[in-house]
Amino acid sequence: MPTIEQIRAARALIGWSQGDLADRSDLSQTGVARIENGSNQPNSTTLDKIISAFDKADIEFIGDSGVKKRTGDIKKLKGKQGFIDFMNDVYETSKNVGGEICVFNVDEKNWIKWMGQDRYDSHASRMKKIEKDINFKIIVEENDWFFIATKIAEYKWFPKELFNEQSFYIYGKKIAFINFLNDDVRILMLEQPQFTDGLRVLFDIAWNQVAKTPEKEA
């Protein structure tokens, strides 16, 4: 378990305030302050929440005194919280670097299923605030009219025979491969510019040469 000094050092390493740590670990800022000043001895459940929050920020604790930033460029997430963490990363990355967001093989009902309507609405609202900095393209299945991001994104249809629910998301210099299962969701995030740039080329080919602009029947 991390020491008080390691918790302080971990916050400093990634520029978190006590409030930031409290928000990400579902604790109160007062509670975090009391842990760090030694006036409150946290139980194992509280420490697990703190460790989990830092783990999601790629922070590792070494022994009883060390702290380091994880250097690997692959991250795995799963389940509802994993999906929410992924969408938070999409927002934070897009806010910081802008650019083009490309989403392929999407059934957006999965976004509502795994985020919940209220949380998705909150996400859409914050993305709307940065729309001038992004160019958002989404490819969905042919004849799918369930569009949830029309205020910020352009949509195209992909032929039914080529569509599946193995989705991928390109944003910044990152790729996320998303596998939607009946009772779970798995996300593999890769931050590797060469792969990201290569996949953007393939997305552009699909967007420009295969996908079609949705049109209502006359």
Image: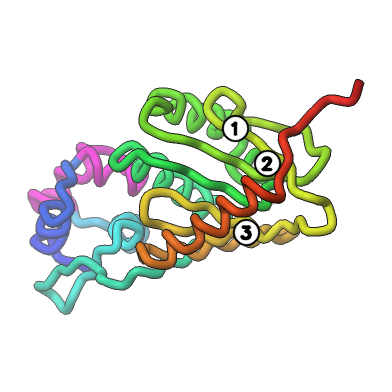
Q: Residue at x 31, y 72 (%)?
A: 72
Apparent side of residue 150 relative to residue 214 in the rendered image (left or right): left
Q: For the C terminus, give its image quadrant.
A: top right
| Colour scheme | rainbow
Q: Secondary structure at mark 3?
A: strand
Comparing labels 1 and 2, the label whose residue is closer to the camera = 1
| Place of residue 18 in the rendered image (x, y in percent of width and height, measured from the top left) | 18, 42
- Type of secondary structure dominating the magenta stretch: helix
Camera-side residue of 193 and 119:
193
| Place of residue 178 in the rendered image (x, y in percent of width and height, measured from the top left) | 59, 59
What is the distance, in whole Å, between disc 3 and disc 1 at their CAs? 25 Å
Q: Are marks 3 and 1 in contact (CB under 8 Å)?
A: no
In which image quadrant can residue 147 be found?
top right
> Which labelled disc corresponds to residue 154?
1
> Which labelled disc corresponds to residue 108?
2
What is the distance, in whole Å, between disc 1 and disc 2 at their CAs? 14 Å
Instruction: Choose the circle earlier in sequence order: 2 or 3.
Output: 2
Q: Is residue 78 visible?
A: no
Apparent side of residue 61 relative to residue 134 in the rendered image (left or right): left
Q: Which residues are magenta?
A: 19-40
> Which labelled disc corresponds to residue 185?
3
Bin the neighbour count of mark 1 within 10 Å (Cα to Cα): few under 14, some 14-19, many 20 and up: some
Residue type at mark 2: give it.
Answer: Glu
Q: Secondary structure at mark 1?
A: strand
Bin the neighbour count of mark 3 within 10 Å (Cα to Cα): few under 14, some 14-19, many 20 and up: some
Q: Residue at x 66, y 44 (%)?
A: 139
The answer to whether 45 is drawn above or below residue 147 in the figure is: below
| Place of residue 179 in the rendered image (x, y in percent of width and height, measured from the top left) | 64, 62
Comparing labels 2 and 3, the label whose residue is closer to the camera = 2
Is 37 in the magenta? Answer: yes
The answer to whether 218 is drawn above or below residue 46 in the figure is: above
What is the distance, in whole Å, between disc 2 and disc 3 at their CAs? 13 Å
